Image (cartoon, helix red, strand yellow):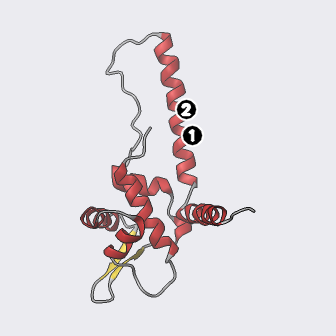
Amino acid sequence: MELSLKCEYAILALMELANHYGRDQPLQIKQIASLQNIPDRYLEQLLATLKRQGLVKSQRGAKGGYTLAREPWQISVLDIIRSVEGNDPFLPHRNNGQVVSAAVEAVLEVWSVAQKAAMDYLAECTLKDLCEMEKQRRHVSGMYYI
């Protein structure tokens, strides 16, 4: 299992929106791209996808931009991954009707359990959780010792 760059950018963009949640002014693509070091054009496509999936809302006009469509604690990391990658980001292994050995069956069972555990964790972890983790890391990295 590996996090694609597409998913990473989507998560970072939504974290930025979550950090600004509750403020009256939406964030523009250039602001998000600059704050999270994401290419503008790529972010534009990602936000369009996330809008179609109901995770963000857009507002037109000079003071327009993007906001979260739901509260940060209502959007899980799995929601984001599914929005970007499709409904089944971790497709189960298919053996195409081939007979497999007991060893292969054991490996596939372990892999299936690991994937389920990963999906369960990603479903529990929300944007709010990620933002809190980010704040903790910023606080720790900002400290210095004499």
One can see residue 70 in this view: no
Q: Position of residue 74 (x, y in %)?
A: 53, 66
**Kind of residue at badge 1:** Ala
Label 2 crowding class (10 Å Cα cut-off): few <14, some 14-19, many 20+? few
Q: How many marks?
A: 2
Q: Position of residue 43 (x, y in %)?
A: 30, 64
Label 1 crowding class (10 Å Cα cut-off): few <14, some 14-19, many 20+? few
The quarter of the image holding the N terminus is: top left
Viewer-closest of 73 and 28: 28
**Residue that badge 2 annotates:** 113
Mark 2 touching mark 1, by CB under 8 A? yes
Distance in Å between CA atoms under marks 2 and 1: 6 Å
At a point 68% along the width and 65% down the height, the residue shown is 143
Q: Position of residue 38 (x, y in %)?
A: 34, 63
* Left or right: where 15 falls relative to 27: right
At a point 39% along the width and 37% down the height, the residue shown is 91
Measured along the vertical axis of the image, is residue 130 above or below residue 88? below
Hey, which quadrant is residue 95 in on the image? top left
The quarter of the image holding the C terminus is: bottom right
* Left or right: where 135 falls relative to 1: right
* Left or right: where 89 falls relative to 61: right
Mark 2: which secondary structure?
Answer: helix
Q: Position of residue 85 (x, y in %)?
A: 34, 50
At a point 48% along the width and 66% down the height, the residue shown is 15
Mark 1: which secondary structure?
Answer: helix
At a point 37% along the width and 76% down the height, the residue shown is 31
**Kind of residue at badge 2:** Val
**Residue that badge 1 annotates:** 117
